[in-house]
Amino acid sequence: MEYKDFIRAVAERAALSRQEAEDLARATVEMLGDQLSAGEARRLAISLPEPLRGSLHVQDRVEDFGLHDFVTRVSERTGLTMKEATAGVRAVLVTVREMVDDEVFDHVLAQLPGEFQEMVETTT
């Protein structure tokens, strides 16, 4: 999936402008990088469109925080409301799920609290 198609899909799913979707995608990917092991972050980065790869920071230290804190941090970074950020994070995760191998996405979800899986599953 091309970057522009990724952003378009996020914008449509979250009912946001293209710019808001770009900001949201970058913030969400950054936050994912904070919660994934270095190996998993690298595996995910390879599957992302080029402009988003740089947003996924590979960390030696993994942070552990739940979905509410994740969405709050995304909201603060983007200036979106909590409702918009929640819909946006869901849109980004669903779009990532569509573009990466199932195994890669399953490994990403396995490193996140169960609430993330529930969020993605409610869209299927």
Image: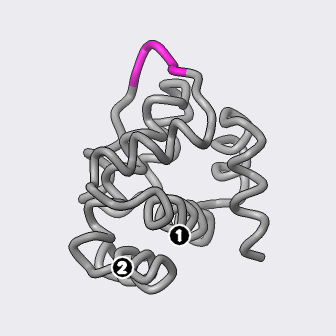
Q: Which residue is mark 1?
A: 91
Give, as a single range, the part of the protein colored magenta. Answer: 59-63
Foreground pick, 118 / 100: 118
Q: Amino acid at mark 1?
A: Ala
- The part of the image, by quadrant, that contains residue 122 is bottom right
Among the two numbered marks 1 and 2 on one chain, the one whose residue lies closer to the N terminus: 2
The image shows residue 105 at horizontal and vertical percentages of 65, 52
In percent of the image, x 45 and y 43: which residue is there? 72
Q: Is residue 8 above or below residue 110?
A: below
In percent of the image, x 51 and y 40: which residue is there? 70
Q: Which residue is mark 2?
A: 16
- Discs 1, 2 touching: Cβ within 8 Å: yes
Q: Which secondary structure, mark 2? A: loop
Q: Which secondary structure, mark 1? A: helix
Q: Amino acid at mark 2?
A: Leu
In percent of the image, x 53 and y 67: which residue is there? 87
